[in-house]
Structure formats: structure tokens, C-alpha cells
Amino acid sequence: MSRDLAPPSPAAGTAPPPQVFAVLSQSRAQLERQAELGGTLRLAQWRNCEDHTGYNRPGHHTLSVYLQGGQDVRVVGERSPLDAAHGQPGTFCILPADHESQWQIAGPLRFVHLYLSDSAWAQRIVRLLDAEPRAYTLAPRFFGQDPALADWARQVSALDWGDTSQRLQAHQLSEAALDRLVLMAAQPHARERALHLAKGGLAPAARRRVLEQIETQLAAGQTEGLSLAELAAEANLSEFHFARMFRHSLGCSVHGWISQRRSARAQALLRERPKLSLAEVAARCGYASASHLSRSLRADLGATAGEWRRAGV
């Protein structure tokens, strides 16, 4: 890998890279750039040529859209139907968390990847489908065509991810693209698989009650009712069993879910209510102060509340 294309060293304490990213890093593919986005999403832009690589149940979802080339890419021994025999600029591929595939790349190829974590997937399934996240997966797609996803790739590839404002634009564009992806390609697991997944998780009625309580309290700018004990009582479970079942169902801790929902609400208020002061936004979302809000958003998005608002995304 050439020096100017080498990926930046990960910061101490950051999460390990997604498996698809790690596999490509060990192949002939060259990483052009990458960016951590909000909502536990990661964006990466690659180029490759004369390579053979494969993925084995990566444990996360990947959206891939070709920027250049693709006519000389083949999926080796693919059993699922292909949208087309080969790719081209603008075509997309969906690599689900539990899929396996082998890829043969002959000619030059440039593409953008968006990696979707378990918690980011869970939030979308709950918000868009009101369903148990573990009971749904993405259907694999190879060389599909969708104008909205092709536009997303063109737009994010034209942005400077090193610039805070433009990286925040890439974040918003990617959030919209993933919502479209879920609505377009999410499918229930087979019944046997869904029943197996349901073991150990929250019952649907309990999950709805708990999540509704979280949203109601956050909308009121209150932290009362959000303690582990109070949420466990809403589900009629002990704190220990509730915490474990919540993680089984939603892919993250109770605290992690609340933090992500609080952050999402703050981002929406900053975008939709420009006349609200940062202190007012903080109070409405349950943050202790405007500085607490900015520190939280910087951790989530790499930008302060003021930078998010000025970006106009």
C-alpha cells in the first residue's frame, strides 16, 4: 500500500474495524480514505485491481456502491440470484452480517463502503419497522441498481471527509441511504431462526413499553424514569435479567441505547429549531448543560453542537 493511501492509525480506545474493512486491508485493495460517522457508522473509499477476496459471516452489514469500473468483478460460485452478471459505476451490493461470498476482481475498481453496526441496525428496525431487530436481516444483493443509492455514493465521494462540516453532511446522507436500504431490502429471518433468536430477549410488548418510556422521557427532557431499575420495572423483570435481555434484543446496553436516542434528539433539535440556544437544546434532551451536550456530540460525531448547527445538516 502506498504511503499516501495508508489508513490513519486508529485512536486509542476505538472499536476494532469491521471485518469487511479488515479483510480488504489485508488484500491488494488500497484504502483511499475513511471516516467515522455518527451513529456507529463507518465510511470508507477503496480502489482495487487484480485481486481475489472473500467474506465469511462478518457480523455487520455493508453497503457497497461502485464509483468506477465493476465490469470485471465476478462473485465466485454465488448461489443467490444476481441482479446482473457484473457491476458497473453506480451499481450496489449488499453484504449482510451472516453472508459468505468470494470475489474475483480483474480490472480497475473504485468503490465506497458504508459499514453498519448492530446497534445502528437495531435502531432502524425498531424505528422503521417496529420489530424485533434480531428477527430481521438484509437480503444479499449483488450488482443491483438504485438511483438513490448511486446518488448517495456520488455525493459522499465528492465531499471532503476531513472537513468537519462536510463529514457531517456525509453522515446525514448516509443515514438517509441506510433508511432506504432497510425499507428496500430488510427481510424476516426464516421462522425457525426467528424463534431461536427470540429466546433470551425481551418480549415484544415489554420492548415496546420500555422504548416508549425512553422516548417519552427524552421528549420531556427528563432523566427520571430512565434508571435501570425503573425501566426493568416497566418490563416486570429484575435489573440483572432486564439488562441482559435488553442487550440480546437490541444489540447494546440500556445506557448505550439511551445515549444514542438522546444524541439523535439533540441533533434533530439543532437542525430543526435554529432559534433554540444550546442550553435550551441541552435541557430539552436531558443533558446537564450546553457543554455536556457539546462533549457528547463531539464523542458521537467528532463535532460540537455549534459545529453541527453551523453545518446546516
Image (cartoon, rainbow, N blue to C red):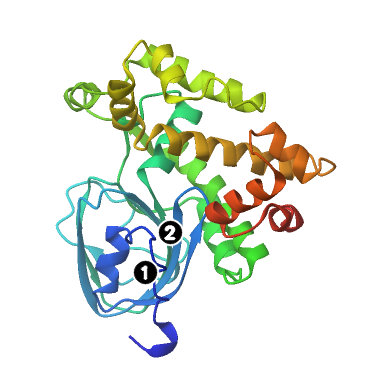
At label 1, counting other C-alpha atoms closer than 10 Å, the crowd grade (few under 14, some 14-19, many 20 or more) is many
Query: Total marks drawn?
Result: 2
The answer to whether residue 30 is left or right of residue 79 is right
Choose between 40 and 286: the one closer to the eye.
286
Q: Position of residue 152 (x, y in %)?
A: 55, 56
The residue positioned 55% from the left and 68% from the top of the image is 157
- 10 Å neighbourhood of mark 2: few (<14), some, or many (≥20)? many
Secondary structure state at the residue bearing disc 2: loop
Q: Secondary structure at mark 1?
A: loop
Q: Is residue 308 above or below residue 69?
A: above
The quadrant of the picture occupied by the N terminus is bottom left
**Does residue 147 appear in the picture of this structure?**
no
Q: Quadrant of residue 68?
A: bottom left
Q: Which residue shows up at 51% across the image and 41% down it?
A: 179
Q: Residue furthest right?
A: 275
Indicate which disc, 2 or 1, sits on the residue closer to the N terminus. Answer: 1
Q: Is residue 236 visible?
A: yes
Q: Is residue 212 above or below residue 43?
A: above
Choose top left, top right, bottom left or bottom right for residue 289: top right
Left or right of 171? Residue 219 is right
Closer-to-camera residue (227/53): 227
Q: Amino acid at mark 1?
A: Gly
Mark 2 sits on what residue?
A: 91
Q: What is the spatial separation of the Cα atoms under label 2 and label 1, in whole angstroms? A: 8 Å
Q: Picture coordinates of residue 195 (x, y %)?
A: 20, 21
Please name the residue that numbered disc 1 is placed on: 70
| Residue drawn where x is 65% and y is 40% of the image | 266
Pinpoint residue 286: horizontal percent, then vertical percent.
63, 33
Q: What amino acid is found at the position of numbered circle 2 in the picture?
A: Thr
* Residue drawn 16% across the image and 23% down it: 192
Please tell me the numbered disc located at residue 228.
none
Q: Are marks 2 and 1 in contact (CB under 8 Å)?
A: yes
